[in-house]
Image: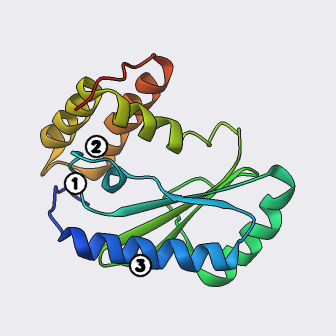
Amino acid sequence: MEIFRLREVAPEVLAASSLAAVTAIRALVPEADVQEAGSTAVPGAIGKQDIDIVVRVNADQFPSARSVLDASYQRNPLQPSAPDFQSYTVSLDPDISLQLTVKDSPFDCFHRFLEALRSDAALLARYNDLKRHWNGRPMEDYRKAKAGFIEDALRKPHSTQER
């Protein structure tokens, strides 16, 4: 059973890994909006210190982008494969995951959640509390709790308080 564990990784390692992955993906899919999309992209967020990257494309670009990424990365079997979403595993240390989404599709929510975390200090504090609560517990249960948290956060307006 996989266990969720909070981790600390040197910021310079995360930054270098993120930059290398984003640069490589932009070279493969130049028409895409490529950005870091996980907790490491939010000042003050805690987590596994893995890097999540979202690749946003128009619907007509999705099939070719998926073909290009399929040739370079392994699909993540733990995530859905859909006509508007595909997840990939890029590397293991630090863990880097890649999510290919169609812009404005139901899966295209990563940037909205990050903006909510960046603009609402109370939401970020609750997200960090959720992660602390699940530290050392089953990853599958953590992922379910996190998914519910994200769905709830995306339904509500958020303040723009400074942290």
State the residue at coordinates (26%, 76%). Answer: 13
Residue type for callout 1:
Phe
Q: Which of 72 and 115 is in front in this view?
A: 115
> What percent of the width, then of the height, locates residue 40?
31, 56
| Disc 1: which residue | 4
| Disc 3: which residue | 91
Select label 3 or label 1 by which is in front. 3
Question: What is the distance, in whole Å, between disc 3 and disc 1 at their CAs?
Answer: 18 Å
Question: What is the distance, in whole Å, between disc 2 and disc 1 at their CAs?
Answer: 7 Å
State the residue at coordinates (29%, 70%). Answer: 14
Mark positioned earlier in the residue sequence (2 or 1): 1
Q: In this view, does 69 lie to the left or right of 3?
A: right
Whether residue 71 is situated above or below residue 30 in the rendered picture: below
Q: How crowded is mark 3: few (under 14 residues within 10 Å), some or many (20 or more)?
A: some
Q: Which mark is residue 142?
A: 2
Q: Nearer the viewer, residue 22 or 110?
A: 22
Q: Is there a contact, CB below 8 Å, between mark 2 and mark 1?
A: yes
User: Element under label 1?
Assistant: loop
Q: Where, by quadrant of the figure, is residue 129 drawn?
A: top left
Q: In which quarter of the image is the C terminus?
A: top left
State the residue at coordinates (45%, 16%). Answer: 157
> What percent of the width, then of the height, locates residue 53?
49, 61
Q: Is residue 163 left or right of residue 107?
A: left
Q: Check the image and name the residue furthest to the front.
A: 162
Whether residue 56 is situated above or below residue 111 in the rendered picture: below
User: Element under label 3?
Assistant: strand
User: Element under label 2?
Assistant: helix
Residue type for callout 2:
Tyr
Q: Residues within 10 Å of mark 2 (few under 14, many from 20)?
A: some
Let me know if residue 1 appears in the view.
no
